[in-house]
Image: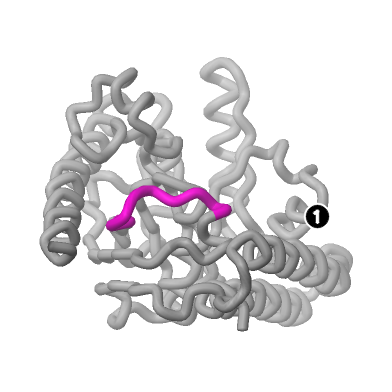
């Protein structure tokens, strides 16, 4: 039914569904979140975690439903997720072009890996509604102090905050480019890649330093929109007719695990070399996928 409505009305309705579902499910998280905060019994807190994760998964499932309903004929070409499992520990790395990417990632990984979590700045815990949801779901919050001593203290605090993930299957995502790709940013950076910005290893380095031994693989994700980068409004109104995603499991080399991304220059260089090789391969893959899409249209 949604697909038959005018585009603007589709967008308004799906936007309303997204806003209401986010608000309502976040409110539903308040009781188990408070119990988890106030009751120091491990079994009780585990039960709360299961309830909170179920609510978050329900939110993703609802989003997936309206994405399909608003454009049922969209072509989703996804490979590399069938061998994953929802009780694993994964570090997810992806290129980043649009806010749409987040819902794309949630859709393709739903039921295949644990609910995706981001490293967030500590100030974001105060964002109305969604900040509470992030806290309840144990998103790792990072402080960013000034000065070397403060940064090392922040890294120690982040490590301690991630200790809980040794008991809970977790997926942590990092957009290595640090921002969404645009032509202007690409030119300003003088990026050596055709379809990517230069990688920034800061967030990835923290993830590897705090949780590296826990991850069983890096999931290297490449997202391509064959008909151009969409805006979030395009997703809401059903204007995205094709999405291509390739997921590759990569082993994490031992020499990029558990080091000091702040004080060890050689450690940062090892991570940088590892990521740059991935970026070279990703750039070529995007080029090939776009060529294939252009050839299919002829």
188 w.r.t. 134: above or below: above
Q: Coloured how?
A: one colour
Q: Residue at x 57, y 53 (%)?
A: 233
Residue 228 colored in magenta in the image? yes
83 w.r.t. 142: above or below: below
Asked if residue 249 lies left or right of residue 182, the reply is left
| Among the 4 quarters of the image, the one containing residue 70 | bottom right
Specify the principal SS of the magenta part: loop
Over which residues does the magenta segment extend? 224-233
Residue 206 colored in magenta in the image? no
Q: Assign the C terminus to one quadrant of the image.
A: bottom left
Q: Residue at x 24, y 42 (%)?
A: 275
On the image, the x and y values in percent for residue 162 come to 56, 54
Q: Which residue is mark 1?
A: 129
Asked if residue 23 lies left or right of residue 261, the reply is right
Disc 1 element: loop
On the image, the x and y values in percent for residue 74 come to 39, 73
- Count neighbours of disc 1 (C-alpha within 10 A) and say few if under 14, some if 14 to 19, many if 20 or more: some
On the image, the x and y values in percent for residue 139 come to 62, 55
Q: Residue at x 15, y 66 (%)?
A: 296
Q: Nearer the viewer, residue 13 or 149?
A: 13
| Among the 4 quarters of the image, the one containing residue 190 | top left
């Amino acid at each position: 039914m949604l697909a038959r409505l005018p585009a603007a009305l589709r967008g308004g309705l799906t936007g309303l569904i997204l806003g209401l579902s986010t608000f309502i499910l976040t409110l539903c998280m308040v009781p188990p979140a408070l119990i988890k905060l106030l009751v120091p019994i491990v079994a009780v807190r585990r039960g709360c975690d299961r309830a909170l994760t179920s609510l978050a998964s329900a939110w993703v499932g609802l989003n997936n439903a309206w994405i399909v309903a608003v454009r049922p004929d969209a072509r989703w070409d996804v490979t590399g997720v069938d061998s994953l499992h929802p009780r694993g520990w994964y570090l997810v790395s992806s290129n980043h072009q649009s806010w749409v990417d987040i819902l794309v990632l949630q859709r393709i990984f739903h039921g295949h890996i644990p609910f995706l979590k981001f490293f967030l700045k500590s100030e974001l815990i105060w964002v109305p509604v969604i900040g509470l949801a992030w806290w309840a779901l144990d998103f790792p919050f990072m402080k960013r102090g000034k000065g070397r001593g403060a940064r090392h203290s922040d890294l120690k605090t982040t490590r301690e905050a991630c200790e809980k993930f040794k008991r809970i299957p977790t997926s942590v995502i990092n957009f290595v480019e640090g921002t969404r790709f645009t032509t202007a940013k690409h030119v300003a950076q003088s990026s050596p890649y055709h379809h990517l910005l230069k990688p920034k290893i800061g967030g990835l380095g923290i993830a590897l330093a705090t949780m590296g031994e826990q991850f069983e693989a890096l999931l290297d994700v490449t997202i391509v929109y064959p008909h151009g980068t969409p805006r979030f409004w395009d997703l809401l109104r059903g204007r995205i007719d094709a999405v291509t995603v390739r997921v590759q499991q990569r082993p994490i080399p031992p020499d990029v695990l558990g080091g000091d991304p702040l004080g060890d220059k050689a450690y940062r260089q090892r991570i940088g070399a590892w990521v740059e090789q991935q970026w070279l391969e990703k750039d070529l893959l995007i080029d090939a996928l776009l060529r294939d899409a252009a050839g299919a249209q002829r």
